[in-house]
Amino acid sequence: MNTIKRIGVLTSGGDAPGMNAAVRAVVRTALSYGIECIGIRRGWQGLITSDFVRLTSESVGHILSRGGTILYTARSKEFMTEEGRMKAVATCKMLGLDGIVAIGGDGTFRGALELSRLGIPVVGVPATIDNDVGCTNYTIGFDTACNTAIECIDKLRDTMQSHERCSVVEVMGRNAGFLALYVGIAVGATAVLVPEHKLDFQHDVVERIRESRLAGNTHFMIVVAEGVGSAVDIGHQIHEALGMDPRVTVLGHIQRGGAPNARDRETATRMGYYAVKAFAEGRGNCIIGTQEGDLVELPIEEALAMKKHLQKYRYEIMETMQFGSRVERTTV
Ligand code: F6P
């Protein structure tokens, strides 16, 4: 017997392509169970300030293919305080919300845990271009962001090739190297620097560029995860060590925009659907994740304690691809 009558849905933290697809799935699944859906704008902050909009099937029409989030997003400092969370609980009571679907990353889910402890059930849907949420193999937005970065780097390669230059490209990822490593493999980078791998500049950059030059190449692509540090500094160090004049590009927020691709639309739709199904079947306080491609539901606290590591074998593949030889020193 479904006792849930009305839920809220919000997007929080950095936006990611596919968030809109998840919102649409939440609303239409809720309606199919006879549950009303209220959009909370600007993430947890909107729950504090009672910033809401009633959502209908029509109001989420034509958003499946749109990047960004129609609900806006924010990182709320106030929600980190007890006082802020009490205001959020008051909004839930005033609006008669029986639960919240929170779409975002780890920060969003830490907020979800706090709210659930105050008696408001929350189901989390992982969405961040960083793919750094421990309880799930995949987060909505990652694939589109990879493709955006690849498209940009392919263009950079054209001009680097013409001018026989070295390019240093910084990609997002916060403290994780998933985006950088996937992209680096996909563009055939000369070197990929990720925070999970302790940097040995001589081995990981200088020797790789030198080997590449000795193999006959005259342009070089170095992909740097933002968690490693500034790509500008890496560029200076390359100049000092090899006398080259690298060009540095920070891809920045462009990686967060654009229409979600097939994987992100489909994953977001499945996750949004299952988030509401969990509520409708009387389960809350969980995060929807993917394990081996299947969706799983994990209690929020357990999910937050899970760690995900950058696979060592992917780093080895990246290293092997440049020279076709086995590189022995990997410490991921
Ligand atoms: O978490 C997503 C992300 O894009 C990170 O990759 C990046 O470090 C951060 O958000 C940037 O945040 P902001 O939009 O606040 O500049």
Image (cartoon, rainbow, N blue to C red):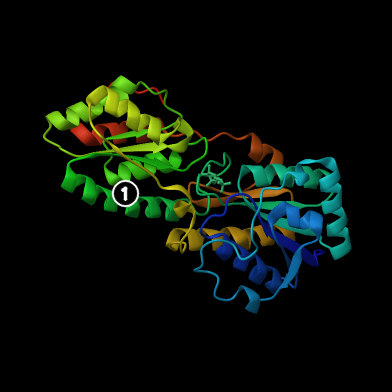
- Residue at 26% over, 36% down: 190
Mark 1 crowdedness (10 Å alpha carbons): few <14, some 14-19, many ≥20: many
- Residue at 43% over, 56% down: 144
Q: Is residue 202 above or below residue 224?
A: above
Q: Is residue 164 above or below residue 233?
A: below
- Residue at 69% over, 76% down: 56
Q: Nearer the viewer, residue 245 or 285?
A: 245
- From the viewer's perspective, is 43 left or right of 254? right
Q: Position of residue 40 (x, y in %)?
A: 73, 62
Q: Report if the beta carbon of the residue with label 1 is closer than 8 angstroms to ligand 1.
A: no
Q: Is residue 11 above or below residue 137?
A: below
Q: Nearer the viewer, residue 33 or 127?
A: 127
- From the viewer's perspective, is 201 left or right of 279? left
Q: Position of residue 296 (x, y in %)?
A: 59, 49
Q: Secondary structure at mark 1?
A: helix
Q: Label 1 amino acid?
A: Ile
Q: Nearer the viewer, residue 149 or 33?
A: 149
Q: Where, quadrant-wise, is the C terminus in this rendering?
A: top left
